[in-house]
Image (spheres, rainbow, N blue to C red):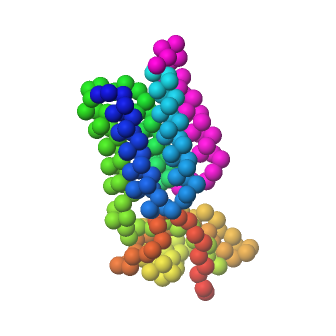
Amino acid sequence: MPRAAVIAIDLVATAILVFGLYFPRYRRRDMVVAYLGLNVGVLTVALALSANTSIGTGFGLGLFGALSIIRLRSSELGHEEVAYYFAALALGLIGGIEVDPAWVALALPAAIVGVMFVGDHRRVFRDHRQQIVTLDRAIADEVQLVGALEALLHARVERLVLRRLDLVNDTTVVEVRYRLDGRESSEPSGHATKLVVAQ
């Protein structure tokens, strides 16, 4: 497949990933710039490395691996946004290196975008949520804690992790994963908030 066609596939797939999937779901303009810049940057360097045989492709991959770690440590991102970050990076690498046979150059970007579309779709486990909850009383008994959380959240608790039990200030901090009781929330899953239980 001609190199120009591979580059075009990368740019189209990245546009779908960023403008068709990510931004409508998360509405973060700053990350749109980051994903586009990352993809085009990786694409151009991969093209330059593939044209210069004196520089190994492994060097380029290691360089962008280090850059991605620095970028991810500089800002708090959710797990979903990290997945988009690496999807944009992978699309750029695929577009910048020689891929044979030709159909693979089309199938790989399509697979990445398809996985992100399905895995991050609102209908996948749409009733499941995860929260970090702060209770205004110390509850050491797990059965009582589950009952208090289910009454507060109107949901069935599936898993909880006790983060802090403060007997002095009479508070409990717990990470809870739960399933809504037939009610769909407008809040995206995976975002941690603090709630207070009235005694």
Quadrant (top left, top right, bottom left, bottom right) of the N terminus: top left
Kindly give the residue lying farthest to the bottom in the view shown: 199
Residue drawn where x is 50% and y is 45% of the image: 36
Q: Quadrant of residue 193?
A: bottom right
Task: Report the magenta residues as a range.
Answer: 51-79
Which secondary structure class fits the magenta region best?
Answer: helix
Figure quadrant of residue 166: bottom right
* Horizontal side of residue 64 vs 186, given as left or right: right
Can see residue 140?
A: no
Residue 99 appears in which quarter of the rendering?
Answer: top left
Q: Relative to 29, is 180 above or below?
A: below
Q: Position of residue 15 (x, y in %)?
A: 42, 49
Residue 71 within the magenta-colored segment of the rendering: yes
What residue appears at the point 29 percent right and 25 percent down from the top-left corner?
A: 100
In the drawing, does residue 88 fall left or right of residue 114? Answer: right
Which residue, as the protein is rendered here, is positioned at the far right?
168
Q: Is residue 69 visible?
A: yes
Q: Between residues 151 and 191, which one lies in front from this camera angle? A: 191
Q: In the image, residue 108 lies at what x, y percent? A: 32, 38
Above or below 185: residue 107: above
Residue at 43% in and 55% down: 19
In the displayed structure image, the side of residue 165 where residue 186 appears, left or right: left
Q: Residue at 64% of width from left, 65% of height from top? A: 164
Question: Where in the figure is residue 135, as x and y percent of width and height?
Answer: 61, 76
Q: Quadrant of the C terminus?
A: bottom right
- Examine the structure image and report whether residue 25 is included in the region drawn in magenta: no
